[in-house]
Image (tube, rainbow, N blue to C red):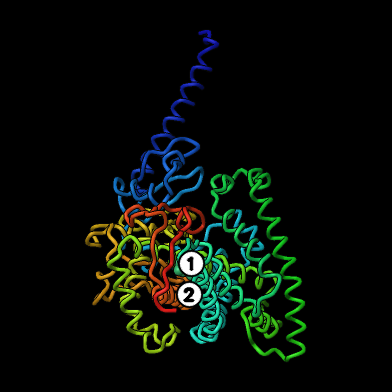
Amino acid sequence: MELQNPFSNIIFMLSFLILLVLFKIVQRWSFNNSTTKLPPGPWKLPLIGNIHQISGSSPPHHLFKKLAEKYGPLMHLKLGEVPYVVVSSPEMAKEIMKTHDITFCDRPNVLLPRVFTYNARDIAFSTYGELWRQLRKICVVELLSAKRVQSFSFIREEEVSDLVKSISANEGSIVNLSKSIFSMTYGIVARSAFGKKNRHQQLFKSTIEEALGLLGEICIADLYPSIKILQKGSRVKTRVERLQGEIDRIFARHQSMIIETITVKQARMKDLVDVLLKVQHENVHSQQPLTDENIKSVIQDLFIAGSETSSGIVLWAMSEMIKNPIVMEEAQVEVRRVFDKKGYVDETELQQLTYLKCVIKETFRLHPTVPLLVPRESRERCEINGYEIPAKTRVAVNVWAIGRDPKYWVEAESFKPERFVNSSIDFKGTDFELIPFGAGRRMCPGIAFALPNVELPLAKLLYHFDWKLPNGMSHQELDMTESFGLTVGKKHDVCLIPITRRP
Ligand code: HEM
């Protein structure tokens, strides 16, 4: 009988294990190369994926644009554990937001917005489903309809006139337009939401401002969702929770005032909170009654989505006009021609300001205030251009890059409002080369509310004043650096000297 080498069993076992591991590697490799063909993208490092390529001093939409120039308009990235697709052409944007809109109409479950919106009980961050459908319908039909927006015109006119008065009072000296424009836009949203000015509004404003800063931060917990401890231990989360507590207290005080008013006056509709309370009252027996959390988070959405976005566009438009004095002059000539007979600017004739509308479109093209749109997430596996996009992939649409692509725009980096004269391109979500409000099911429902908040202040600023840069600065020297957060504005405040031309 032959004696067996005691190591032969071990050698056999080891060889078997090595073969098994090799087989698994080959199997995975061939699987990746046959059925799973992800869109191209830069090399990924273990654990961090592509984080190192997008962390730097430039804002993410700039870095994504550079990478897309190398890897194409449908680019795959991995940030930590999370798969991302970055879209950088009108054709690919159309695939995502039109052809496959139903697949990409979810929002990812991200930590800070979730905490701030009572576990995504709002419109902007809620997942696609019954709650979102109900809130979106209320928003479109009740809160932001053309009729409702029209009913707030007196608020806009008062707030913008107050702005003009305060600028006139400082004629000849430096005015910080950034501060004044933000506070005016905020005033319009606040009065539309809560009715008359009240003492809680200032508190609400500073809370929302702080929240906007925090919500724009990249949260490490969102890049490693499987490591639950990161979610629990996040310091930013604790700060957002504190802010949410403050907002709760403000609403509690405000709501008791509203409920009193409703019972006393038999609910004559005035402001957006009233409208939501009325819908809540009427839907009390429906399958999905509106909760107090829904009301609070919808109002927060309107503040967050409606204040910095619109004021940002006014400031970018003013800055571009300062940099391009011929454009400024043409816009002023138009506004003064239309309103000189009346002697003041109001909303009734804004439609006639066709050149100003081109200035605004051009501003949206070069400076979309939400440059990557609000992130979306795929609900199921999907194939685009022969590439596979697995379920639960986050999608960023780089509207900023699309607006500056020389393939679609002549002299893409120059501010030329004339390009829109006699052009049918609009930002209503059907021309995918210009989509600052997004497109498809998740498109911004606030356009009708936003536009007069941009057009009226611009028209009044151009009608009443000429504008000079301070300290002998030339218009080429005006700084155009971007800030980056939830929305993209100007990093440095716009400070100008007004000279009254029409008192
Ligand atoms: C210049 C002004 C504005 C810009 C550039 C803007 C842009 C956007 C963008 C890019 C989105 C995401 C769209 C997508 O995912 O495809 C969005 C969503 C949204 N916006 Fe606006 N917005 C503006 C003003 C407003 C205003 C004034 C309101 C309301 C008062 C508003 C309310 C909303 C809401 C509720 C959503 C979430 C929609 C959903 O997820 O279904 N926005 N906005």
For label 2, the crowd category at 10 Å Cα-Cα, with few meaning under 14, some 14 to 19 and many 20 or more, is many
Q: Is residue 442 visible?
A: no
**In the depicted view, which residue is nearer to us: 326 or 42?**
326
Q: Is residue 381 visible?
A: yes
Tell me the quadrant of the picture where the C terminus can be found: bottom left
**In the depicted view, which residue is nearer to us: 384 or 224?**
224
Which residue is at 64% across, 60% downward? 116
The Cα–Cα distance between marks 2 and 1, rounded to whole angstroms, is 8 Å
| Mark 2 close to ligand 1, CB under 8 Å | yes
Instruction: From this view, report whether residue 370 is shown above or below residue 200.
Output: above
Q: Residue furthest front?
A: 172
Instruction: From this view, report whether residue 346 is shown above or below residue 479.
Output: below
**In the depicted view, which residue is nearer to us: 449 or 23?**
449
Name which quarter of the figure residue 433 lies in.
bottom left
Q: Which amino acid type is shown beneath numbered disc 1?
A: Ser
Image side of residue 414 versus residue 297, left or right: left
Image side of residue 283 versus residue 369, left or right: right
Among numbered discs 2 and 1, the one appearing first in the sequence:
1
Marking on residue 191 = none
SS type, badge 1: helix
| Mark 1 close to ligand 1, CB under 8 Å | no
Name which quarter of the figure residue 188 lies in.
bottom right
Q: CB of mark 2 within 8 Å of CB of mark 1? A: yes
SS type, badge 2: helix
Which residue is at 65% across, 57% downward? 115
* Residue 166 rendering spot, x and y as whole percentages: 53, 71
Q: Which amino acid type is shown beneath numbered disc 2?
A: Asn
Pointer 2: what residue?
Answer: 453
Pointer 1: what residue?
Answer: 311
Name which quarter of the figure residue 137 lies in.
bottom right
* Residue 366 rendering spot, x and y as whole percentages: 35, 61
